[in-house]
Amino acid sequence: MSAERPARLGLRVLALAYLGALLLVPVGVVLYRTLEPGIGAVWASLTTPAAIHAFQLTMTAALVAVPLNTVLGILAALVIVRGRFRGRALLDTVIDLPFAISPIVVGLSLIFVYGRTGWLGDALARAGIQIIFSWPAIVLATVFVTVPFVAREVAPVLREIGTEQEQAAATLGASSWQTFRRVTLPAIRWGVAYGVVLSTARAIGEFGAVSVVSGHIAGQTETLTLLVQERFENFNVAGAYAASALLAVIALCTLLAMTMIKPRKEYA
Amino acid sequence: MSTEAVIEATAPAAAPPWAHAVRNGAPAGVRPGRLSIGVVTLWLSLVVLLPLAAVVAKSLQGGIGAFWAAVSSAEAVAALRFTVLVSLLVTAINAAAGTLIAWVLVRDEFRGRRAVGALIDLPFALPTIVAGITLLALYGQGGPVGIDIAYTQAAVAFALLFVTLPFVVRSVQPVLMELDRGMEEAAASLGAGGWTTFRRIVLPNLVPAILAGCALAFARAVGEFGSVVLISGNIPFHTQVASVFVYKQLEGGAPVSAAAVSVVLLLLSLAVLAAIRGLAFLGARHER
């Protein structure tokens, strides 16, 4: 009913053309350009010492940020949904802040705390700890930008499942921890999984925040995304495409994981 | 003894079986204790609030006069103005394109619809610097289609359209799925055309979702950096956006100026967050 057949067809073509011109064709062109010089050249440019180090640094940052924000994200969701205390609404807003803030501001803010002239600058210098322009800053930036994901995915699920089953478990003598592990956690697991996938993608793909605090030292403080920029600006376009293609493949795996988890999350 | 108490005492079967446990002070489900609340508050304070407070403090280091001088410098004003204007344009395009895409995904049927639906999230999954590179590969110098928009204001708009694509679609899609089609059928049977039905029946129901998606898209566009940094060319007074301006100020050894413009961006983000909260509140009241 509603839209007549030709109109419906027209809208479909319009929507698909928009998506094609904006998303599909550009990504396709980069993948094509990457493979133009042959798979051997791509492999060579992805296995240079700098590229391998960048890959390791990116994974390290993700491996610290994602588990940390998964555990604290679940806790934060519980606090926001089930807590009854003053300031709950404020906490709820603070969790969303990293979503709304420019990544550049995130990086800048870390410099003003941990940098040489920052709030903790003197104390850190005396202790001989360097954070800014070193790997800990990259980890900190990644932790900042991935704060909201798990909490934001888990909170609606917690609201939906209510507390009846947990109350029943408590009645039957389960401790709080047992109730959480045996009743709550299984109920929210797909929401957690979805949040983990989103945070991992963001951790691997973060650029602006790490760009400000990294110092861009090749082979030391360069993540994969920074490697893309450095190669592009130094006219190593083929190398930039190769690293981009690797990140694009990771993104496609992320999409696949999201597509597989989504229905489970919604009909849990 | 009041009558209610009598009824309660004489009709225990009406109460749920665990009611005695609740009355005896057993936990009503997993409730976060003071420790959990403290841990979460401390975590968010250390990771998020402390750094942001440092930015605000830095911006006011030279007094309110220095703050104002930094924010009202010609280059800063140009960057902020361009950022807000291009973000508004991109948000408006998203409102139309996002609603259209959501409609096609929910109401249309064609092969590959599920794949297209999954593709919508690509801008969330793809690193922003890669988004910039891909757009530059297609629409930059020497691209296969023979158009070169690199280093133009249009290129900035294009990059922002890429990264903000999912917001309106993902916000409108679930509402459209839940929408009762009885009203539309009634309108159609009374002789309303497809467009009239959409405009008079469907669209009013979608407006809150469209606005919420727009707010998120706007917030994202205002702060965007990675996808814009390569394709914009960062020409002051022309294609330089606020986030790139902040970056350049920091590199150029003007941290107070960088902090001041950052605070303006922060205030914009907070205003958008508040607007989203307001919308959600209005929506909840509307449903009741």
Image: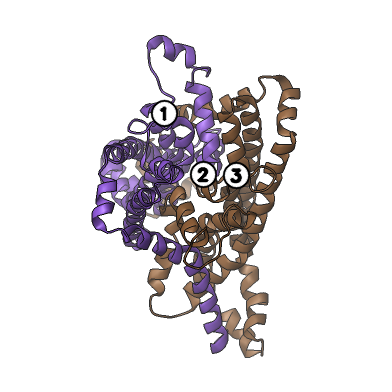
Chain colours: A purple, B brown
Marks 2/3: CA–CA distance? 24 Å
Label 2 or label 1, whichever lies nearer to me, is: 1
Kindly identify which numbered label has been placed on residue A99: 2
- Residue A87 at x, y percent in the picture: 55, 33
Front-most of residues B8 and A168: A168
Q: Nearer the viewer, mark 2 or mark 3?
A: 3
Instruction: Give the structural element (helix, strand or loop) at label 3.
Output: loop
The amino acid marked with disc number 1 is: Ala
- Mark 2 residue type: Phe
Discs 2 and 1 share one subunit? yes
* Quarter the C terminus of chain B occupies: bottom right
* Quadrant hosting residue A72: top left
Q: Which residue in the protein does label 1 denote?
A: A137
| Residue A21 position in % (x across, y down) | 50, 67
Secondary structure of residue under mark 2:
helix
Q: Can residue B33 be seen in this view?
A: no
Compared to A54, does A158 lie above or below? below
Q: Do labels 2 and 3 share a chain?
A: no
Camera-nearest residue between B26 and A88: A88
Q: Which residue is under mark 3?
A: B234
Residue A41 vs residue B55: left or right?
left
